[in-house]
Image: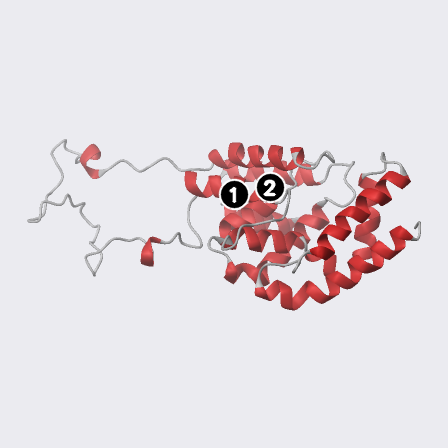
Amino acid sequence: MNDLVAQWAAVAGESAAARAIGAELIARWSEPHRRYHTLGHLRAVLAAIEPLAGHAADPVAVRLAAWFHDAVYDGRPGWDEERSAQLAASRLARLIAPPAPSLTDQGRPDGSAPPVSSAGEVRSPGVARPADGGSRRSPGGARPATGPLDGRRVAEVARLVRLTAGHDPAPGDRDGEVLCDADLAVLAGPGYDAYARAVRQEYRHVPDDAFRAGRARVLDGLLALPSLYRTPPARERWEAAARRNLRAELAELRDGG
């Protein structure tokens, strides 16, 4: 459990609010009705993100989305992802730091106006201007890979969570491609049989014949895709093994297994 606490702190911080949200998420992923969508799945998705993270535009948002993507799980496809996205937006909004007051708002301790440079800029004692005279934004205005939460990043996390309902990111959606590939990495793993059994347990309320038919449709749809994975590293690592596993399960389902 300490490994998850540390991973959460790395992306959300260590404030009291962040710790409370992390504890809530771990409790949600530990709910007794879960069989596949458990802490084990969360750990697996977080681990699968790492070799793909270089492909992401905002790997912090991707990691946060992994924490929330099945945080609400009631076995209702689409509904679960929507509620999980709403949870992400609600909880992460608590972690947005308020904007720092400007120097013109603050003034000086004695009530006088702050010093002004010859160029008309307000300056604060002890705060140096960037050596290049430019802004402190990252090159090209791109969002840095780390840093505080803001409204745009929270919205991106919620969008990514919703995307896991269909695992169909648009071309060029680098964050979506990484999250969806990481979520589907289980298809290629040596524990595929255990994964398939756990999925059946989560749908144990569905009669066998109906489950086999529905599951076969899902597998047929996956196998019909030109590629199961969107990122080059994922295709190289997992595509061939995932297709073998899917074909084996599909054959078993059609044999009445």
User: Could you tell me if the residues under marks 2 and 1 are in contact, i.e. CB atoms within 8 Å?
Assistant: yes
Residue at point 67% right, 48% down?
A: 42
What residue type is disc 1 on? Val
Instruction: Using the image, determine if residue 106 lies above or below residue 122.
Output: above
Q: Position of residue 131 (x, y in %)?
A: 21, 60
Between 128 and 87, the one nearer to me in the picture: 87
Residue 256 position, x and y percent, is 93, 49
Task: Find residue 186 and report its image quarter.
Answer: bottom right
Q: Nearer the viewer, residue 79 or 115?
A: 79
Whole-percent x, y for residue 90 in the image: 52, 32
* Residue found farthest to the left: 118
The vertical placement of 227 against 104, above or below, is: below
Residue furthest toward the right?
256
Q: Secondary structure at mark 1?
A: helix
Q: Please tell me which of labels 2 and 1 falls first in the chain.
A: 2
Label 2 crowding class (10 Å Cα cut-off): few <14, some 14-19, many 20+? many
Q: Who is closer to the viewer here, 207 or 114?
A: 207
Q: Secondary structure at mark 2?
A: helix
Where in the figure is residue 224, as x and y percent of width and height? 71, 56
Tell me if residue 240 can be seen: yes
Determine if residue 46 is in view: no
Residue plotted at (60% across, 49% down): 168
Q: Residue at x 47, y 52 (%)?
A: 58
Q: CA distance from mark 2 to mark 1?
A: 8 Å
Q: Is residue 154 above or below residue 240?
A: above
Q: Amino acid at mark 2?
A: Phe
Q: Identify the coloring.
A: secondary structure
Q: Residue at x 22, y 50 (%)?
A: 127
Residue at which label 2 appears: 68
- Read off the residue under disc 1: 157
